[in-house]
Image (cartoon, grey):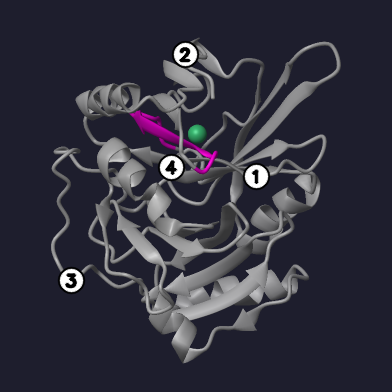
Amino acid sequence: MQHSLEIAYLGLEVPEPESLSAFFAEVIGLVPGEPAADGALTWRNDGAAQRVLVQPGAANDAVLVGLEATDLAAHAAAVERLGGAGFAVVAGSAEECGARRVEALARTTAPWGMTVEVVAGLERGATPYASPLVPGGFLTAGLGFGHVAIATMAYDESQRFLVEGMGFGRSDWLQMPMGPDFELDVSFFHCNGRHHTFAFVNAPFEFPQRLHHVMFEVNERDDVGAAFDRAWASGLPIPNGLGRHDNDHMFSFYVQSPAGFQVEVGHGARTVTDDWADDRRYDRISAWGHQPLRQG
Ligand SMILES: [Fe+2]
C-alpha cells in the first residue's frame, strides 16, 4: 500500500522511568536504546534508534506520539495539511531534533491532549537490532513500531485530526453495549498497511490515563506465546488472555504495565489495502478469547 506516514515513537511520562525497565526488557522483549539527550530512557523494537521514550514526570501516561513522514517532501506536505485543517504547528528546534534523533520535527497538540510530533529521518540505532527474547523480531517495516489506543472525550475532534489533519483513513469501528448504561465505542484508523495505527475509545469521562494500550506485533506466532508465558510468570495483571480480534484478526494478549497502561503483544493481523472496502461496524471485540485472566 502506498503510504507517507508511520508511527515513529511513543513518549511516556512516569515518576520513575526505570520502574518500567524490567517490564519492557524482560516481559515484552524490547531492547534498551541509548538515553536521549533530554535524559529519557529509550527502547527499541527494530533498527530505529528509539521507539519508546520514557521521561520522568508526573503524568503517568503517554504524553507524546511521533509520526514519521517517509521523506522530507512528505514531511512538508503533512505539516501543510495539518495547518490547513486548522491545527497550529510549531517547527522544532535543532535541540528537539537531536533529542528525538530525527532530521526534521514539527509539533502540534492533538485534541486528545498529547503532543504529536511530525518527524522525518528517524536515525538508525548505533548497534544492529536483536532481541534475545523475541528471536523472530517485531513487524515494523513500512508499518511503524506498532499501534496505540487512546481513550478521550474529544472523540470526534480526535478523528478529525487524524483524517483531515493527517490523512488517515478509517478502517472500521466497534460499538457494543457494556452493561446497562454504557456502550463501548471505538474507531480504528490507518495511515499505511497496518490495520490501525490509532484507535480511539469514546470516553464517557476523562480517564486517569489516556493511553489504554500500546501494541507491538511480532513476526512469529510462537513469540506471542513466549511473551504470554513471561507475562504470566511476572505476576502482572493480564486483563485479556490470548484471543483473536474480530476486526484486525490479531492474535494477541494484553498485560498491564507497572504504570497502569496495557501492552498488547500480537501476531498475524490482516493488512489494509488501497481498495479497502470493509469500513463497517463490529459488535464484538474478539472472535474468540481475550478473556479477563488476572485483574490488577
Ligand atoms: Fe490493540
- Residue 248 seen in render: yes
Q: Give the foreground label among 1 and 4.
A: 1
Dot 3: element: loop
119 versus 179 height, above or below: below
Crowd tier of the residue under label 3, counting other residues whose Cα lies within 10 Å: few below 14, some 14–19, many 20 or above: few
Q: Separation of disc 4 and disc 2 at Cα?
A: 27 Å
Q: Give the foreground label among 2 and 3.
A: 2
- What residue is shown at x 14% (from left), y 66% (from top)? 127
Q: Separation of disc 1 and disc 3 at Cα?
A: 33 Å
Mark 1 or mark 2, earlier in chain: 1
- What residue is shown at x 52% (from left), y 16% (from top)? 286
Please state, as top left, top right, bottom left or bottom right, where the C terminus lies in the image: top right
Could you say which disc has been placed on residue 209 in the image? Answer: 1
Q: Amino acid at mark 4?
A: Arg
Mark 4 or mark 2, earlier in chain: 4
Q: Separation of disc 1 and disc 2 at Cα?
A: 21 Å
Q: Name the residue beneath numbered marker 3.
A: 126
Q: Is residue 5 left or right of residue 282?
A: left
Q: Name the residue beneath numbered marker 2.
A: 293
Residue 62 drawn at (x, y percent): 56, 54
- What residue is shown at x 36% (from left), y 30% (from top)? 266
Q: Name the residue beneath numbered marker 4.
A: 194
Q: Amino acid at mark 2?
A: Leu
Pointer 4 and pointer 3: residues touching (CB < 8 Å)?
no
Q: Amino acid at mark 1?
A: Gln
Dot 2: element: loop
Q: Separation of disc 4 and disc 3 at Cα?
A: 27 Å
Mark 2 or mark 3, earlier in chain: 3
Report the magenta residues as a range.
Answer: 259-271
Q: Is residue 224 magenta?
A: no
Q: Nearer the viewer, residue 254 or 260?
A: 260
